[in-house]
Amino acid sequence: MSARDTLAEVDDARLPEVAQKWLNEHPFGLDDEHALDLVRELVALARRAKESDRLLYCWWIPG
């Protein structure tokens, strides 16, 4: 399964859990609220890409 499809299929109720796991593994200097917002945005983007049968590209620019 692709990263796009995996993200697209995350249940909304699990988004806080996903955000917390991401923070634990990759602390980018984000607080819990901002990490959750970012995960919500990524999941929404993945869902739109999947619905449109498009690829998903993401670049992370820390700072």
Image (cartoon, grey):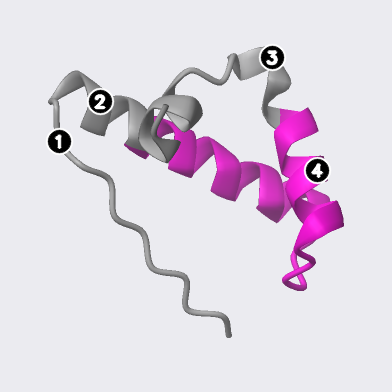
**Residue 12 percent coordinates (x, y):** 60, 17
- The residue tagged 3 is 13
**Residue 36 percent coordinates (x, y):** 68, 42
- Mark 4: amino acid: Lys
**Residue 38 percent coordinates (x, y):** 56, 49
Instruction: Answer above or below: position of 51 versus 25.
Output: above
Q: Are marks 2 and 4 in contact (CB under 8 Å)?
A: no
Give the residue at x 81% y 43%: 20
Q: Are marks 2 and 1 in contact (CB under 8 Å)?
A: yes
Find residue 34 and report its image quarter.
Answer: bottom right
Q: Nearer the viewer, mark 3 or mark 1?
A: 1
Mark 2 or mark 3: name the one nearer the start of the chain.
3
- The residue tagged 4 is 21
- The residue tagged 1 is 54
- Closer to the camera, 43 or 53? 53
Q: Are marks 4 and 1 in contact (CB under 8 Å)?
A: no
Image-based side of 20 in relation to 61, left or right: right
Q: Which secondary structure, mark 2?
A: helix
- Mark 1: amino acid: Arg
**The magenta segment:** 16-45
**Residue 16 percent coordinates (x, y):** 75, 31
Q: Which secondary structure, mark 3?
A: helix
Q: Nearer the viewer, mark 2 or mark 3?
A: 2
- Mark 2: amino acid: Lys
- Extreme residue in the right direction: 24
Mark 3 or mark 1: name the one nearer the start of the chain.
3
